[in-house]
Amino acid sequence: MKVRVSFTTKTIVLLLAMVLTVSVVISAVLIKESEARLLLQQKESQVNNQRRVQLFQEILHNRMITLIDVVSHSTSTQLNDLNSLQETLNGLSEYLALNFQVDKLYLFDENGLRNITSSQPDSTVTKLVNVTRVTFDSRSVMACDSICTHYISIPVMSADEVVPVIVVSTSMRELLSLFSRATDVHKVAVVQPRETSLGRFELSIASQLSAANRAYMEDLFNELPQNWRIDDLVIRGVNAKLGEQQLLVSLLPFNNTEGDTPYLLIVQDISTMVAQNKQYQYIVISSAVVLFVVFSLLLYLFLNQYRTRLLNVSERLPMLAEHKFSEFYASAAKQRKSPLFNATDELDVVEDAANNLARQLESFDGQMAINTAKLEKMAMFDTLTGLPNRNMLTFQIEKQLAGSMRDDKLVALMFMDLDDFKKVNDSHGHEVGDKLLKAAAMRISKPIRETDIASRFGGDEFVVLLSNIENKKQVDIVAQKLIDEFESPIIVDGITFYVSISIGIAITSHSRATPIDLLRHADIAMYEAKAKKGAEYRVYDATMNLKVMQKVELEAEAREAMRENQFSLALQPQVHMHTGKLIGFEALLRWHHPTKGHISPADFIPLLESTSFMLELDYWVVARSTSLIRELKNSGYGDVKMAINLSAGQFLDPSLPEFLQQQIIKNDISPNQICLELTETVLVSDIERAMDIMRNIRDMGCLIAIDDFGTGYSSLSYLKSLPADYIKIDRSFVAHITSSSDDRNIVHSTISMVRNMGMQVVAEGIETTEQYELLCHFDCHIGQGYLISRPIPEVNIWDVLCDKVSQGVWKESA
């Protein structure tokens, strides 16, 4: 794998991106801050200008009032004196016009206007006079038409009911002049906004200006942004560029106006301020760029040497994997460290470690070939027995299959395992078990030819591959020899073991067969042989595979049946032979398939016995049986017992006692209401372990019955050692006690012996009255069979009990 982008390059790019981001953010913040500061200055200037305008208006207003008061008090306010006042004002009109920019003077008496000037006042003046007479206070108002005029009304002291009023009109020139001199603004004028037909606003000049200033203002208005608003001009102003000048245009509203509100237009030259702000922004951006470039250069100078060294290491290390040691050392010799960084760092440690690793790998390279050969040998042979293992076996099977078509020979595969080998490990430990396996491997290797291959497949499973086979008879001979080898016991550490083997055989001449197919077929045949209870061999045929498929299908259907509640119990009554008293029931499993109907236990239980599901089904039977005991107890049958059949797997399961205890507590029943039935074949398979489990179950208070008694291998010889409560005589003996003297004697002897040993006898399969009476004569304790009742589905149990049981006694036979 070749390096496309080195780690240090990625690091440099990442750090530069971070620095660039930080620089941009800081620069943007500083620029934004400078713009905000400029805007704040503009707002503060607008507020200060507004205060100045108000101040100048008050000064001019008060000055005019003071002047008129002086004039009016110098004459009497009688009628003749009003004439004198009028003459005085007429004489002062030119003086006032020159010095105070007074355009017109009006004197109003009780009869109205006394002409001072030739022009007539408008409605604004009339309203102003009326308000002054009512409030007897000086008033001022601004009225704008094409030009804005400032009117001041001044009441005159008089004894008349109607107060004489003097009205003075002045232009805005003095106010503009004062404001211009006090603030040092660039231009100032009075304007009025007017809305155009397009819905926009435009400014018109409402004060007297020179032609040059008016033209300047018109040009400035054209440079304003198209979407300017009155609020923007009033609050902070709007920037406009006229020629080389940067101008701030703002409006100040006038109070005490008639009609449309006029505004004081202020034009300030902010070219210097804008230039300073741009210079500041330039400095900020330039500084950020310089810092970024300097940092980038330093970062590159610092990390580039690490990038070079890392690339070199990344290129050299793959050479070790390819065993190119000379090229590795040559590349290492070219590596030179910068004199600026002489101190040892992590890369130096990595490089030293890589060099040491190269030397070690080079020294180990020769040894690896030897070790590989040893490992290959170990991979092909079993370490315990020395026989070829599964890998070697698979290779040899493929080889045999490839040559079978060419040589016109058969390929025969024998799959075998030791019967009940697990008991050896459980009873004597794995060390003894391993020794037994080694001894078994020697016996398996003994009868086969040198050209045949005996291998250990795993655990206690062995496979023999036969070569040069011409017919099936040769295979049968070898299989029988192998079985005969295990007739004599194997002695390990002074312990004698009687071991048998089950053999499954698969034979083929098909070159397209695979080792997996042969092994699977032989394994299936081996389980067929095991079904014959050991020391047998079977040759695979297609029907065996069909059985396996049926078994898999049946297990899947059974699991589905468990989820769909298709299983149920049928209860067969057990009664006291002499009194007819109902003792209990035997719980029998039933399966009603939704499409196949009733499936007999004889059909599905044998197929499910070797599956993992059988244990789950067994525990379901126990749970359902104990639940029925509780229901019977709650319905008045508190002393009846339930006989439950146990499979070998469930009986040997270590969790059985705990599960029984949980069900007893859960259903609040007595332990002696549960009777577990075991077959002789389960017990004799491991008599010692079976007796320990039986004692544990009896210590809990549960009862134990030996089922199918008399059909096993050594019934009476071990009967005295079994901790059982009941012995059930198999139905095969009961069926012929009236016609066969041998069966009659066996049953009679068994009943007598069991009674003498303190156990009770249960006779199965009673179908005739003669059988029932003869068993009573033999003093049999308990009986069950079709004569008494057929198994009753659990859903019908309550109807049958109501019909058949009276005061605990089974009334009549079925």
Image (tube, grey):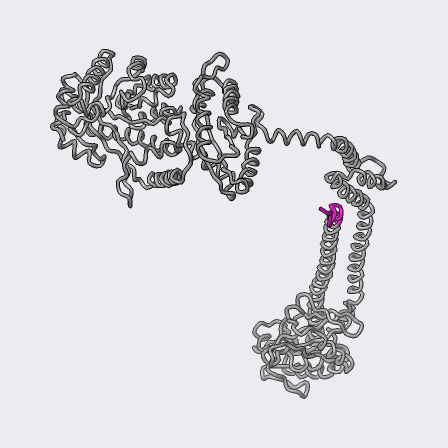
Q: Reply yes or no: does residue 10 show up in magenta.
A: yes
Res 495 visible: yes
Residue 62, percent from left and from top: 69, 70
Vertical position of residue 644 compared to residue 176: above or below: above
Picture quadrant where residue 538 is located: top left
Q: Which residue is drawn at 49% across and 15% down?
A: 492
29, 664: nearer the viewer: 664
Q: Identify which residue, 194 or 490, lies in the foreground.
A: 490
In this view of the protein, can residue 580 be seen by the observer?
no
Q: Which residue lies furthest to the right in this view?
A: 339
Residue 328 position within the rendered picture, expressed as x and y whole percent measured from the top left: 80, 39
Q: Residue visible at 79% across and 55% down? A: 289
- Residue 624: where, in percent of width, then height? 29, 32
The residue stretch that appears in magenta: 1-12
Q: In the rendered image of this protein, does residue 517 appear above or below residue 161?
A: above
Residue 748 x %, y %: 19, 16
Residue that extends furthest to the bottom in the rendered view of this protein: 118
Q: In this view, does 685 lie to the left or right of 394?
A: left
* Front residue (pair 560, 467): 467
Q: Image quadrant of residue 420?
A: top left
Query: Does residue 492 belong to the magenta stretch?
Result: no
> Is residue 609 placed above or below 3 in the rendered structure?
above
Q: Image height check: is 534 above or below 403? A: above
Residue at 63% across / 69% down in the picture?
231
Count all numbered tags in the image, as a single digit: 0
Q: In this view, does 198 lie to the left or right of 431?
A: right
Q: In which quarter of the image is the C terminus?
A: top left
For this view, does 745 lie left or right of residue 337? left
